[in-house]
Image (cartoon, rainbow, N blue to C red):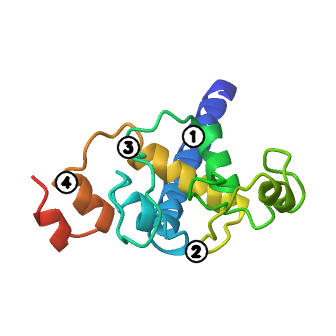
Amino acid sequence: MRWGAVAIAVMVLHAASQAAAQGNVALGTEIWRNKGACQGCHGWAGDGRKMDSQLPDGADLRETRLDRDALVIAIKCGRPGRGMPAFDKFAYSDGRCFGMTLADLQKDGLTLADPAAPLQPREIEAVTDFLAAKVIGQGPMTRDKCVAFWGEDVAVCITIK
């Protein structure tokens, strides 16, 4: 009897963990599309085909080789001198990013783009979860993936074969 209860508890915890992960991916998708405005530079599909010619060129995240930790650092700390903003509000205030402050960046002649909005640590994690689940290593965008991303068959999906 006791093993049956343990097995049920493990299944419940696994289901709860899966639901939380799906919720984090959904939150990450929302942040990608809106609050973080990530698609402006990286393209809505994360393939580097940016949405606004005035913004920096973002990396093709469908082909990135960054692991989870490196993605979190890139989002949190940005890429000084390369157009990627730091989404952590305090990234260069106290040395938490690369042991540098804003004064250190300026001394080295590095600039840092302003983010659309700062993100909380849990939001950075959610964007990372979204990228891991829906973008990185997922191959080229297809019409089915496009419809899933937008939640409906929008005009941009019609152009994808």
Q: Which marked residue is nearer to the observer: mark 1 or mark 3?
A: 3
State which tag comes first along the sequence, 4 or 2. 2
According to the picture, the residue beneath numbered tag 2 turns out to be 116
Q: Is residue 87 left or right of residue 116?
A: right
State which tag comes first along the sequence, 4 or 3. 3
Q: Can you say which quadrant of the picture contains the N terminus?
A: top right
Residue name at image x 42 percent, y 68 percent: 40
Q: Which marked residue is nearer to the observer: mark 2 or mark 1?
A: 2
Label 2 element class: loop
State if disc 3 and disc 1 touch (CB < 8 Å): no
Q: Is residue 153 visible?
A: no
Which label belongs to residue 144? Answer: 4
Label 3 element class: loop
Disc 4 marks a residue whose amino acid type is: Asp
State if disc 3 and disc 4 touch (CB < 8 Å): no
State if disc 2 and disc 4 touch (CB < 8 Å): no
According to the picture, the residue beneath numbered tag 3 turns out to be 62
Q: Which marked residue is nearer to the observer: mark 1 or mark 4?
A: 4
How far is the residue under mark 1 from the one under mark 3? 28 Å
Disc 1 marks a residue whose amino acid type is: His
**Label 2: how many Cα within 10 Å (few below 14, some 14–19, many 20+):** some
Q: Is residue 93 left or right of residue 153?
A: right
Q: Is residue 30 above or below residue 81?
A: below
Residue name at image x 45 percent, y 55 percent: 58
Q: Is residue 67 above or below residue 120?
A: above
Disc 3 marks a residue whose amino acid type is: Arg
Q: Is residue 4 above or below residue 76?
A: above
Disc 2 marks a residue whose amino acid type is: Ala
In the image, 60 versus 147, the foreground residue is: 60
Q: Which marked residue is nearer to the observer: mark 4 or mark 3?
A: 3
Q: Position of residue 39 (x, y in %)?
A: 42, 64
